[in-house]
Image (cartoon, coloured by chain):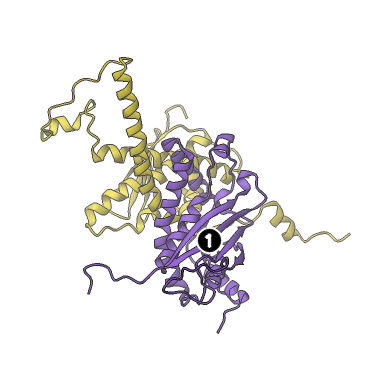
């Protein structure tokens, strides 16, 4: 049974509505903004700040996915395309109350390599692009010239969150910003590319 | 010409607050503390290196010699201003001041938003009441449980179930959880302090936790208000 895009949207709405613990997004935006400023002051290097934001996001993502799976009780996604749909319509909706649009693109012409767990349209190399028309993290934010020149991706924590969450469900992905309205671009886009599926590993010492 | 309905217009003028999931904020704060611990270590290492370089270049006199290696003497550890040994207390201090700074930024700006349609505050008690009711409700979904004052600029706000620390627990036991809570509470203290400062009252806010999840904040406002 393929869940349609509309059904995912409905699931996302339901999850959001059922959440009892909501906070003002301005508080969230202000806290995140102050945190980024502090990191910039501490590291004095925009590339390093990007890295730290991504790392922070990774840790958040590993916890977030548990929360998400517990709440949503969605099953395993059948292919990477479905992953994109779920992330955009259910994931982002239930945590940030936004629904980015998702554009899928399948893998480039197949190379001779193949992984052990290749699935139908989940071939490594497939990707999707999330286009955020609103970014709750970037409310009230304007980047100074230094940050623009230094290459700061303000919302880089989102990339880490996606990477961390997907790694916990056995997908190794590369997540990066393509454009950001804070940098003067037309839209805010994040590309998620599937690198490979991870084998379920039993932790050392467990039986 | 059809006039737009009153409710549609008022929604335009005063849009309902956008919300985000509370869990997202919790996760962000948890990881923020970890990220700040690392970044404050980086910053203080850099500061020490600069100081070291300056000492090498003879630009500043060398610091007094560090206290003897055996730091077991409790008298020394309490007053080691010259000791360059970065202990866990120093690290925590860096994180705490950063958390407070973040809180001040959030509190100041958020208070501005909250006060937009309010008339001017009549006196300091009015401001404190604003903090106890409006600020507390917007940030932490409830009002302060108890307010005490000595009518001379010192106010004690007590919250019996303070939201930011209500879910803290540690597998190392109660004491450890208490210790962590004391660190996390720096951010809310900053929020209160920032709000007061933006309203015009430069005071100090000292949080105190004896038993989780109860928390008190001691606010000292300057005497001439």
Q: Quadrant of the N terminus of chain A?
A: bottom right
Q: Quadrant of the C terminus of chain A?
A: bottom left
Q: Which element carries disc 1, helix, strand or loop? A: strand
Colour assigned to chain B in the rendering is: yellow
Query: In the visual, does B38 lie left or right of B172?
Result: right
In the image, farthest residue toward the front:
A112
Q: Residue at x 25, y 35 (%)?
A: B86
* Chain drawn in purple: A
Chain of residue at mark 1: A
Camera-nearest residue between A170 and B115: A170
Q: Can residue B22 be seen here?
A: no
The percent position of residue B43, horizontal first and vertical second, equals 37, 35
The percent position of residue B154, horizontal first and vertical second, equals 38, 36
Residue tagged by mark 1? A192
The percent position of residue A52, horizontal first and vertical second, equals 42, 47
The number of discs equals 1
- Image quadrant in which you'd find residue A202: bottom left
Camera-nearest residue between A32 and A196: A196
Q: Residue at x 27, y 51 (%)?
A: B178
Q: Residue at x 25, y 18 (%)?
A: B62
In the image, farthest residue toward the bottom:
A1
- Image quadrant in which you'd find residue B109: top right
A10 in relation to B137, above or below: below
Query: In the visual, does B105 lie left or right of B151?
Result: right
Query: In the visual, does A106 lie left or right of A201?
Result: right
Mark 1 burial class by Cα count in 10 Å: few <14, some 14-19, many 20+:
many
């Amino acid at each position: 049974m393929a869940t349609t895009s509309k059904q995912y949207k409905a699931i996302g709405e339901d999850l959001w509505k059922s959440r009892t613990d909501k906070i003002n997004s301005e508080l969230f935006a202000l806290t995140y903004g102050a945190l980024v400023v502090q990191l910039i002051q501490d590291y004095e290097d925009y590339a390093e700040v990007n890295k730290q934001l991504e790392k922070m996001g990774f840790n958040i993502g590993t916890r977030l996915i548990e929360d998400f799976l517990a709440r949503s009780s969605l099953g395993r996604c059948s292919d990477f395309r479905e992953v994109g749909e779920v992330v955009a319509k259910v994931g982002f909706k239930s945590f940030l109350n936004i629904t980015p649009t998702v554009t899928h693109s399948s893998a480039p012409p197949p190379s001779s390599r193949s992984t052990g767990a290749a699935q139908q349209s989940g071939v490594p190399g497939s990707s999707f692009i999330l286009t955020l028309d609103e970014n709750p993290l970037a409310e009230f934010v304007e980047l100074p010239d230094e940050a623009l020149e230094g290459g700061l991706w303000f919302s880089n924590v989102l990339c880490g969150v996606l990477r961390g969450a997907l790694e916990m469900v056995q997908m190794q992905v590369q997540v990066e910003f393509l454009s950001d309205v804070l940098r003067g671009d037309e839209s805010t886009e994040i590309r998620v590319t599937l690198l490979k599926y991870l084998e379920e590993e039993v932790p050392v010492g467990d039986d | 010409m059809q006039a737009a309905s009153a409710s549609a217009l008022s929604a335009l003028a005063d849009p309902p607050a956008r919300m985000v999931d509370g869990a997202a904020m919790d996760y962000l704060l948890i990881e923020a503390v970890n990220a700040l611990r690392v970044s404050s270590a980086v910053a203080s290492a850099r500061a020490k290196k600069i100081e070291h370089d300056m000492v090498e270049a003879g630009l500043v006199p060398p610091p007094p010699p560090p206290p003897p290696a055996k730091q077991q003497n409790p008298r020394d550890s309490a007053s080691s201003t010259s000791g360059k040994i970065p202990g866990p207390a120093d690290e925590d201090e860096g994180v705490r001041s950063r958390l407070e700074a973040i809180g001040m930024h959030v509190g100041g700006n958020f208070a501005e938003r909250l006060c937009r349609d309010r008339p001017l505050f009549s006196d300091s008690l009015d401001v404190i009441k604003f903090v106890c009711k409006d600020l507390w409700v917007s940030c932490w979904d409830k009002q302060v449980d108890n307010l005490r004052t000595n009518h001379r600029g010192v106010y004690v706000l007590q919250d019996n179930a303070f939201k930011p620390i209500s879910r803290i627990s540690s597998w190392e036991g109660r004491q450890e959880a208490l210790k962590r809570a004391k660190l996390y509470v720096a951010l809310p203290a900053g929020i209160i302090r920032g709000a007061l400062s933006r309203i015009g009252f430069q005071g100090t806010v000292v949080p105190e936790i004896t038993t989780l999840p109860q928390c008190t904040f001691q606010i000292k406002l300057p005497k001439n208000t």
